[in-house]
Image (cartoon, rainbow, N blue to C red):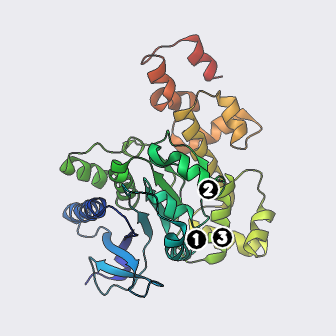
Amino acid sequence: MTAARDLIEIGLVLYPGVQEAAVLGLTDLFMLANRLAVERSPEAARLRVSHWQLEDAGHTVVRTFDSDPGADNEPAMVILPPTLGDPIAREAAAPYAGWLRDRHAAGATLGSVCAGAFVLAETGLLSGRAATTHWAYRDALALRFPDILLDADRLVIDDGDIITAGGYMAWTDLGLKLVDRVLGPTVMMDTARFMLVDPPGREQRFYSPFAPRLTHGDEAILKVQHWLQANGARDVTLGAMADHAGLEERTFLRRFRSATGLKPTEYCQHLRVGKAREMLETTMRSIDQIAWEVGYDDPGSFRKVFARITGLVPGDYRRRFGVERAALGGDDRSETVARLEQ
């Protein structure tokens, strides 16, 4: 049996109405990625895949399938697969919501596909945060959870500790994103090639998105990470972070760096740059506007931080990955593009 410390468990939740084809497809995807990773390096991290659903009494969520029985660890990631039926009723989702909140509080990344967003939203963790779902469920999700920043035009929204995917078949995109996060881009590409599916666009790039450490076990620091993720790390001070953690500043600094591998300032910079990358890819806002929206009063400072973290200045990043490339015709150096780079 593989040592628990070498395992990264991904749990799939079998809620009422879940599509078994997607559950089995994700299981196969993760098990394939695990095999390909081990073939490349016997020392590679291993994936453990588990299925979770309510026990017969209907009060406790338990494992019903385990690819590595007996390992003593909890899911580092939990996914709500899609359904093609009506969205789950609030009463039916409630027992899963409590369990999901506990997993998130323990550091697990949560993800949903299609109407799985209704189960995830029942936790309250999507309140005030960006999320997506299948376009057919957009109005129903917005009506039931009006405090979600819903963007059903997006296929996948990766917000660090929470990832939502829209289309029914977007389970392949979400699955490959998680493989990239835990096993790296090479194994992700190997998995996509073997399955003959398109790899997710952002994760095959050299400039990988920021994936914060969330499974370090320090509850006070995790609380601050969730708070920073929710507010985009805007207008935060060291004192405010320490107060939110309930720690003295010196103790907070030491524990934060030990848990995340970064100083608080560096961590906030990564979060802000992540938001800026998203806007550069998907909007036509000017770089100065984006700098202000992610919390930088000085666009020059924003450009320097962005280049240090991504390896590209914002204008070059937008030319390579942004929407205006397609909208304006490839490498067209029009006045509009020049204006956006100001």
Which residue corresponds to the image point at 36% horizontal and 64% vertical from the top-left?
18
How much space separates mark 1 and mark 3, taking CA atoms? Answer: 12 Å
User: Seen in the image, is 251 located left or right of residue 88?
Assistant: right
How much space separates mark 3 and mark 2, taking CA atoms? Answer: 23 Å
Look at label 1 and name its amino acid. Ala
What x and y, as percent, mark residue 265? 69, 56
User: Is 146 rendered above or below residue 2?
Assistant: above
In the rendered image, the residue lying farthest to the top is 335
The earlier-in-sequence mark between 3 and 2 is 2
Mark number for residue 223? 3
The earlier-in-sequence mark between 1 and 3 is 3
> Element at badge 1?
helix
Q: Quadrant of residue 29?
A: bottom left
Q: Count neighbours of disc 2 (C-alpha within 10 A) and say few if under 14, some if 14 to 19, many if 20 or more.
A: some
Which of discs 2 and 1 lies nearer the camera? The answer is: 2
Question: Closer to the camera, 270 or 90?
Answer: 90
Look at label 3 and name its amino acid. Lys
Mark number for residue 145? 2
The N terminus - image quarter: bottom left
Decide if residue 244 is in sight here: yes
The C terminus - image quarter: top right
What x and y, as percent, mark residue 252? 71, 72
Q: Are marks 2 and 1 in contact (CB under 8 Å)?
A: no
Q: Are marks 3 and 2 in contact (CB under 8 Å)?
A: no
Which residue is label 1 attached to?
Answer: 259
User: Is 153 rendered above or below residue 97?
Assistant: above
User: Seen in the image, is 212 located left or right of residue 287?
Assistant: left
Question: Closer to the camera, 213 or 41?
Answer: 213
